[in-house]
Image (cartoon, helix red, strand yellow):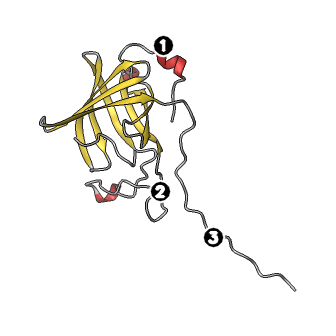
Amino acid sequence: MRSILIPTVAASLLSAGAAAAAPAGDPSGTWLTEDGRAKIRIEKCGPNAAHACGKVVWLKTPLNDQGQPRTDIKNPDPTKRSRPVIGLTLMDGLKPEDGAYKGQIYNAEEGKIYDVSVSRESAGELAISGCMMKILCGSQTWTKAPDEFAQATPVKAKAATVKPAAN
């Protein structure tokens, strides 16, 4: 797998100190993808907050070539292609298993879903391993990102209108 995430995928949950105090294996926090193009916030979710969910909170390039916010254009479901990538849930309901959280991750760059295993390597590193059909596999190391507010979905600037002076 080229990249589990995308140029269109990644801002904060826990401070660095709180992340360091997180239980071993807990992936909670904001993470910069290996390619530096996105930040993903992972939080506890589901029944009794036993699962992990992750969504895009920042993009290095939040606008497309037309100056519009990036959207989920490769989604196989045409009704979802206009969804903004910022705020897009990529991981939903990953379950704890063998010291990691396992489930599926959505790659908006390809519009594909991969089986994924997410595990905390250290306070500052998160190991992401994914496979499609158990044969196309890859891995990345994400790094802890400083806490910040989530990036707002950018809006294309409107041209200023000039009103004629009244006589």
* Nearest to N terminus: mark 3 or mark 1: 1
- Kind of residue sitting beneath label 3: Ala
Tags 2 and 3 touching, CB below 8 Å: no
- What is the CA distance from the residue labelled 3 to the residue labelled 1? 48 Å
Where does label 2 land, which residue?
63
The residue depicted at 38 percent of the width and 48 percent of the height is: 7
Alpha-carbon neighbours of circle 3 within 10 Å: few (<14), some, or many (≥20)?
A: few
Alpha-carbon neighbours of circle 1 within 10 Å: few (<14), some, or many (≥20)?
A: few
The residue depicted at 52 percent of the width and 18 percent of the height is: 18
In terms of depth relative to the viewer, which is nearer, 114 or 82? 114
* Nearest to N terminus: mark 2 or mark 3: 2
- Kind of residue sitting beneath label 2: Leu
Residue at the bottom extreme of this rendering: 167
Tags 1 and 2 touching, CB below 8 Å: no
In terms of depth relative to the viewer, which is nearer, 122 or 134? 122
Q: Position of residue 29 (x, y in %)?
A: 46, 27
7 displayed left or right of 161: left
- What is the CA distance from the residue labelled 2 to the residue labelled 3? 17 Å
Looking at the image, residue 44 lies above or below residue 113: above
Q: Dot 1 lies on which element? A: helix
The residue depicted at 35 percent of the width and 46 percent of the height is: 6
Where does label 3 land, which residue?
159
Looking at the image, residue 88 lies above or below residue 32: below
